Image (spheres, rainbow, N blue to C red):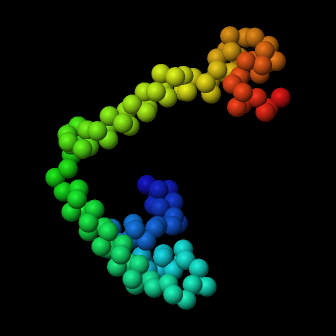
Amino acid sequence: MPTRRRADNGTFRSPWWHVRHGNKAAAKKSLLRLTSRNQPDFDVDETIAMIEHTDELEKHMSQGVGFLDCFKGVDLRRTEIVVGIWLVQTLGGQNLMGYFAYFLCVGNPSLRTTLDRRPSSYTDVA
């Protein structure tokens, strides 16, 4: 796929991505590109060392962890909280609120009627 290769070569990679792929020189170059030159106390090597340390901690913490671990121990509680928040939004009609005007247009009422019945957060368009 020449198109993907061409697009992939031109994209900017974060210092974290370079460290995770073992390219410390590119991570340093990327970090220098992201930081201001007006910070005399900034140490690139210290920051790269911190990124490497954090990456090693994340690798160590994620060893032997799978999808089913979301439903065990402390992670079960986190999963319950996230699913609960998602359910409250969905069951409260949040997903349909943005499409309400669309559904009215499909039913063929006049445009003015559609705009009058939209949620108040979307009525700034007239």
> x and y percent of residue 69 in the render?
21, 43
Residue closer to the observer: 123 or 26: 123
Percent across and percent down for residue 80 are 32, 34
- Whether 73 is drawn above or below 62: the answer is above
Q: Quadrant of the N terminus?
A: bottom left
Rendered residue at 48%/76% (across/down): 31
Q: Is residue 6 visible?
A: no
Task: Name the spot of residue 15 as percent of width and height, x first.
Answer: 43, 71
Residue 82: quarter of image: top left
Instruction: Specify the farthest residue to the bottom.
Output: 40
Number of disc labels: 0
Relative to 41, is 89 above or below? Answer: above
Residue pictured at 72% horizontal, 27% vertical: 120
- Judged left or right of residue 13, residue 35 is right
> In this rendering, is residue 20 above or below 81?
below
Rendered residue at 71%/22% (across/down):
118
| Residue 11 is at least partly visible in this image | yes
Quarter of the image for residue 113 reads top right
